[in-house]
Image: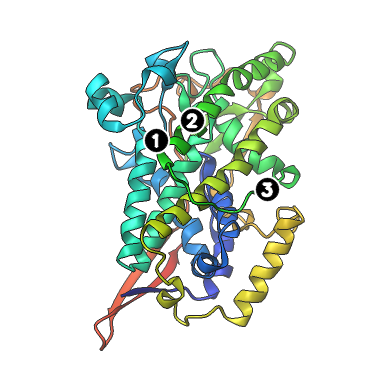
Amino acid sequence: MKKILLPLLLLAALALVTGSAQGWGFFGHRTITQIAVYDLPASMQSFYYRNLLSLVLQSTAPDERRGTDPNEASRHFIDMDHYSEEDPFGKVPREYEKAATKFSTDTLKKYGTVPWVVLEMKDSLTEAFRMRDSTAIVHYSAELSHYVSDAFVPLHTTINYDGQLTDQKGLHALWESQLPERFISTYHLEAEPAKYLKSPLEAIWTVLGQSYGFLGETFDRALKIEKTMKPEVRYTFSHRYGKTSRRFSDAFADEYDKAVGGMVNYRMRMAPGLVSSLWLTAWQDAGKPDLNALMHPSKPTKEEREKLGIELASWKRNTIAQDQLLLAQQKLKKADVVETIKSARDMGDAPANNADSDAPASDAISPAADDDAGPAKLKVKTKRTSAGTQKIKEKLDD
């Protein structure tokens, strides 16, 4: 039986961790994963809270792989408007086998497979629960959280994933990274308790349908601001990891938040409920194994109980962001902070090698990953005991 030993010192070490703007952005994915733990029943919550740091860090691993795994990108989205602009959800079969028969596996891979990846991760988590494999439980719980969260983003359901087809390039990072990071203290993050899902397949397709329904407002509200805000005010240039790129300015973000901030908050608030419900569903489908038996010590410590109590109370008051209790809010590494060189007003046109002027290499990279170096990685060391079990220690590689 594998057990994760997570020293409390790691919680302090997280202050050195930061992430990049991919998917919901590392900030968004980590926030959603942490809130999902608060949604769980007591029978699961102690185990998940004991492993909260690992869950939060590993929830961004799928985005970290995108630069090295050519098969990863298409797992984060599904371009529904490729299949039909009028009734795409009536054209695409829910089950993967039927969809592959109708459109081919290559087509599904090119235009995204996120609903079926969610089911794959749920099944893998169920098996991890059956095997009482604590390492695998944490791993697949974090992976599942990531892909479920991606399904809540409207721009993950369209070919025009970054506004690149409507001269709104940069909308992707603005919607799911810049707004949450800038306005998290104004968001409501309370969520419904986890519940057993009779049909996870139907649940994830319902979420994708809702996300697709928000696309019109996502683009139209930005266009309305663009008509009244001059380009030199609308954009800034930033330099990160030796690369200069253009992004929407804070002034534009402020106006855009007034227009769509409620939508962004709503999608972020709803995501943890489905994440925790899928965790609960996998656990119940596996026969409800005793998760406390996978912990060492097997009961929450006094410090854990007190800390969880403080966080739950803050979350229920909807002050968890204001109280700086989200792990995603911890201090960034100096090297990872975006250096804003000049405003667009001062710089004029973007440099010729500006990344924003490059066309996507393929429709399969539909939402594009940023070029950030990403967060610190977890180093894992294993040691066999005399009883034949493995102890796994994790530490941050900073």
Instruction: Answer whether labels 1 and 2 touch (C-beta < 8 Å).
Output: yes
Kind of residue at badge 1? Pro
* Furthest residue in direction front, as rendered: 198
153 vs 357: above or below: below
Note whether 335 is above or below 97 in the view shown. Answer: below
Q: Which mark is residue 208?
A: 2
**Dot 1 corresponds to which residue?**
115
Task: Decide if residue 200 is in sight here.
Answer: yes
What number of labels is visible?
Answer: 3
Q: Residue at x 29, y 32 (%)?
A: 96
What secondary structure is marked by label 1? helix
Tell me residue 310's x, y (percent).
71, 68
As helix, strand or loop, the secondary structure at mark 3 comes to loop
- Mark 1 → mark 3, Cα distance in angstroms: 24 Å
Residue holding disc 3: 189
Amino acid type of the residue tagged 2 in the rendering? Leu
